Image (spheres, helix red, strand yellow):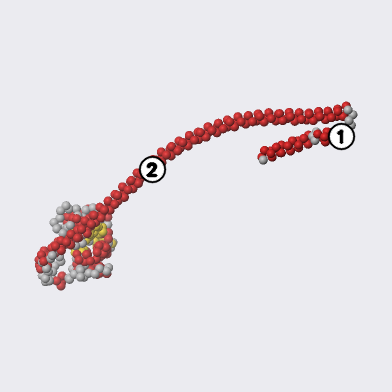
Amino acid sequence: MSFAIIRNTKYKRENLKGIYRHNERRNKNYSNDNIDKERTYLNYSLKSPKYRYDKEFDMMREKYNLKGQIKTVSNIACEYIITSDKQFFEEIGDEETKRYFETAYQFVAEYKNLGEQYIMSAKVHMDEETPHMHLIFLPVVHTQDKKGNNIDKLACSEFWKEKDSYRRLQDDFYQYMTSHNFKLERGVPKEETGREHIDIKEYKEITNFDKTKEKLQSMKLELPNVPDITDININRLSKKRDEKILEDIIKPKDDLIKELYQNNLLMNQQLLRQAKMVEEAEKYQKERNKIMADNRDLHKQVDNIKAEYKQKEDNLEWKYEHKINKLEKENNQLHRIVDKFHETINKFIEWVCKKFDIGAEDNLIRDFEKETKNSLEIEKIEKQIKKEDREKDWELEL
């Protein structure tokens, strides 16, 4: 079973710059061999400071109007290192590891009614042997001044004034984490082990195989038979390391390269399609311009044809109107000739009847029509002519 681990360290102002550079990975080189720079990009923050820790402290003190006298030797900030063992994090996986540190962050905000605003920084390191979180906070107590006014006071000694403060911290942290469904054990108190509290530097040294036995023996612990590192199959470790590097570093980068290549290929295809579309658009524009020009020419031709047709129409209209007028004039003349001829025939018949004493004019006309089979009446003559015309048309059709 794994342990719920939380370690506290107090810092003076002079310590804050160095702690900031380490936690935020601002150094070029580190004495800690456990840091794998190839994995530093996996580190993340649950809360990031805007400035260096010393400047951030001054800003927070002014912003929240923190009371309390600060001397050069005063401890003005504390740091929790929160972790468990490597096997625990490997078993729970990345998502639960993230939840572990987020839950621990919430514990610190609630512990002793501190308040999330007094957490300066919370940085999770994934680039060392075991995942852990460096959480920097101001040890603020909520109290009253001499006048009975509520104040927030920066006082590290008061924050940790109980003799069993660290024991309570360990107990409360263990209970909080297990209440959030993390299967952990409470570390054995020093009253039972007889050892003193391990500081952060010593804790990190213990994580090294070569120093583990020596460090634990100096604490008067009886150790089980731990196999020497040389007894472990080096090939198997190397293979696992290679697989880990392949899985955690090379494969993600290879996948990223493939993704970038696919994106680049897709972009090139899109550019080619766009270039083709532009080429087609230019071709279409040229064809459109040609069609528009042809259309304008056709409109001109149509306008010319219309003008020519109108001229011819006007000419024909004048020509036929003139001819019609002429025919109407000739027709009128013929009608007058016919009327005059009919009038002359009637007078001639009347003259003949009187001249030769023939008798009534009607008898003469009747005898003439009977013998010649021709009529002298205009209506009958018109009917006869129409009949003859129909008979001719009929013969032509046949």
Residue at image mark 2: 280
Looking at the rendered structure, the secondary structure element under dot 2 is helix
Frontmost residue, 305 versus 254: 305
Tell me the residue that label 1 is attached to.
363
Q: How many marks?
A: 2
Instruction: Indicate the secondary structure of the residue bearing disc 1.
Output: helix
Residue type beneath disc 2: Glu
Left or right: residue 1 compared with residue 289: left
Q: Residue at x 21, y 64 (%)?
A: 83
Question: Viewed as shown, does residue 83 lie left or right of 396?
Answer: left
- Vertical arrangement, residue 54 with respect to residue 393, above or below: below
Left or right: 102 in relation to 304: left
Camera-side residue of 310 and 21: 310
In this view of the protein, can residue 322 be seen by the observer?
yes
Residue in view at x 73 percent, y 28 percent: 333
Q: Indicate left or right for 356 with 379 as reference.
A: right
Q: Is residue 17 visible?
A: no
Image quadrant in which you'd find residue 394: top right
Residue beneath the point at 22% across and 59% down: 247
Q: Can you tell which quarter of the image residue 93 is in?
A: bottom left
Give the Cα separation between the discs numbered 2 and 1: 101 Å
